[in-house]
Image (cartoon, grey):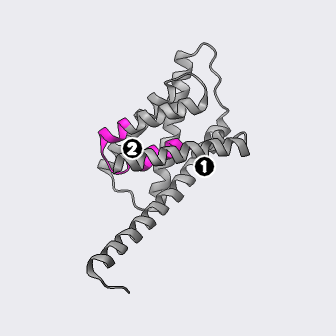
Amino acid sequence: MRVLSFLLALAVAAGLHLAGLVLVPGFPRLVDLVLIVVVLFARDGRVSTATLGGSAAGLVADALAGGPFGLHGFADTLVGYTAARVAQQLVVQRSSGVILVFTLASALQQALLAALAVLLLPAAELPAAPWMIAKAACTGIVGLLLAQSERLIAGRVASRRAERRTGLRG
């Protein structure tokens, strides 16, 4: 079930990425929806799942970006691994901690992509620093909103299950 929900979230993120690209041509410069899916699913602390999910999501991001294949795959794999390891060590519940996790994940991904581009591409074009900061901030905000929505929906589903199990409505 977890794999299906990950694949569905990844498909929705890819669809929203394409829709955002049609509506606002600079949309990928501001928000990385695929990275948000990776971090959302890595927050449960399962390293192997997060690493494989990051790899798959990174390859989807490579396909959406249209650039060299594998850069996002490598970066998102490391971000998924790192986010899962952090989730094993820390319990992040407050909004400030959640936004920090998503913002730092975006900053790590951008640093990895820049390093890979400089090392592997003959003519690396790096985004300007203000765009990198804006992308990290926007990804953090959208990640926070989605994490809060996920928590709210999970709470409602759990209460409905409890109502069905006990037969009480209140």
Residue identifier under label 2: 83
Going from the N terminus, do you reach mark 2 or mark 1 first? 2
Give how far across and how far down residue 11 sits, in percent: 51, 44
Instruction: State the residue in front, 99 or 77.
Output: 77
Residue 138's label in the rendered image is 1
- For residue 52, side relative to residue 115 (left or right): left
The image shows residue 75, relative to residue 34, as above or below, that is above
SS type, badge 2: helix
Is residue 32 visible in the rendered image? The answer is no
Give coordinates of residue 22: x percent, y percent. Answer: 71, 42
Q: Is residue 40 magenta?
A: yes
Relative to 110, residue 146 above or below? below
Callout 1, which amino acid? Cys
Residue 145 image offset from top left, x and y in percent: 53, 59
Residue 139 part of the magenta segment: no
Secondary structure beneath dot 1 equals helix
Q: Which label is found at residue 119?
A: none
Q: Amino acid at mark 2?
A: Ala
Residue 148 visible in the displayed image: yes
Residue in view at x 36 percent, y 41 percent: 50
Magenta stretch? 32-52
